[in-house]
Image (tube, rainbow, N blue to C red):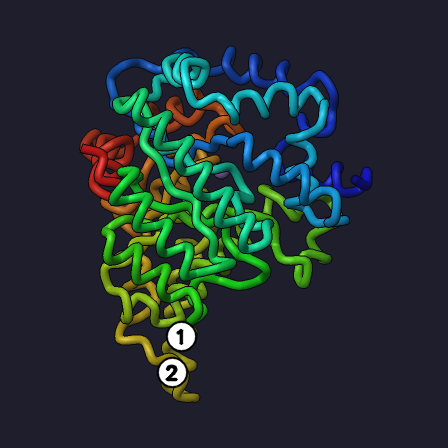
Amino acid sequence: MQRRDILGLAGAIGAAAALPGVANAQRSLEEGRFPKPSGKYKRIGTEAAFATQPQLDGFRDIGKYLAEGADLSFTQILLGDSDYAKDMTPRLLNIGEGRIAEMDDGGVAMQVLSLTSPGVQLFSADTAVSIARESNDILAEAIAKHPSRFAGLAALSPQDPKRAVVEMERAVTRLGLNGFIVNSHTDGHYLDEEQNWPILEAAEALGRPIYIHPRSLPETSIAPFRPYGLGGASWGYAVETGTHGMRLLFSGVFDRFPNLKIVLGHMGEGIPYWVYRFDHMYETARRNWGTGGLVNTPSFYLKRNMMITTSGMFSESVLKYCLEVIGPDNIMWAADYPYQNNREAAAFLDAAAIPETQKIQIYSGNAERIFHLN
Ligand code: MN
């Protein structure tokens, strides 16, 4: 891996990544800053990453023949022997007692687990199908051992939508999983494209949401983001995943699949901020040039078909704005464990000056409803 990529990633996931010895120190500093949260709330973390050995083995194999890309850098860091990897990779792999101890420390009652980014999105179709299936089995086993502490989202393979749908049905009806995870684009393709409609149709029919989690922009558009580490979590992930969300809102898939639910992390990947402007421009274009074709305005679908989570965005002013724009029924709490700190995520919502009833909805009520956790 090139040093340039590593430095880019450092901007993406926090400076700790590139500085040996800093990751653990930063974690204990954060924990010192935020006291152990009270037991007042049932906190359900709706974005909580885990890894499986088959997935890491897949990352190891792919590293042999792919030369670059921010996702690749990240996968290779997880496999490496930096202090960051020594801290993070075992925590990702732990979906048992070790994780539960950290949940207890962070005041987290339950995690909705999902295979860490970029999930299976980097792999060839056959590899993606088999790693998704194996990982979903491992996930279901962990949930069976700790049913009150874990729920889970099934990985799937848009590389092969037909086999993805087979796995989606198995994941819900046989494994009892609670939804699906897709790490944004797959080879530069997005879920609004017609070949992926069977995936959207299956999610709607099964009554389970698809969580669209960030990954790096495709190679065709990442170049301007490479300097200064802007390709990752500080900006590029939101551009990529927000674009995915906007494509869904503007494409008409929510007229075709009116009961489909899509979850976006990081307070909606910037989309709520743009509601005024994109509705206005949609209408302007429709009136003047006859474009459009939606039954409603784009923001209608944002409120009806999308949920957002607080993952990695612990800002009270953003929370209040999102409550105003998309409402208390559409926001769920998440820490983005283990990449961000459970205690900080809890301290943020505990302290927020919003009605108590809304905190309960955000901490647990909405997740219980959307992921069928009861
Ligand atoms: Mn995440």
- Residue 99 locus on image (x, y percent): 44, 18
Residue contact between numbered discs 2 and 1, judged by CB atoms under 8 Å: yes
Q: Which residue in the protein does label 1 denote?
A: 282
* Image quadrant where residue 346 sits: top left
At horizontal 27% and vertical 41% (from top left) the residue drawn is: 174
Out of 16 and 91, give the one closest to the viewer. Answer: 91
Left or right of residue 5: residue 41: left
Left or right of residue 51: residue 276: left
The span from disc 2 to disc 1 (Cα, nearest Å) is 6 Å
At horizontal 21% and vertical 29% (from top left) the residue drawn is: 356
The amino acid beneath tag 2 is Arg
Task: Work out whether 233 lies above or below 28.
Answer: below
At horizontal 27% and vertical 14% (from top left) the residue drawn is: 39
Task: Work out whether 293 lies above or below 55.
Answer: below
Out of 370 and 152, give the one closest to the viewer. Answer: 152
Q: Secondary structure at mark 2?
A: helix
Q: Which residue in the protein does label 2 denote?
A: 286
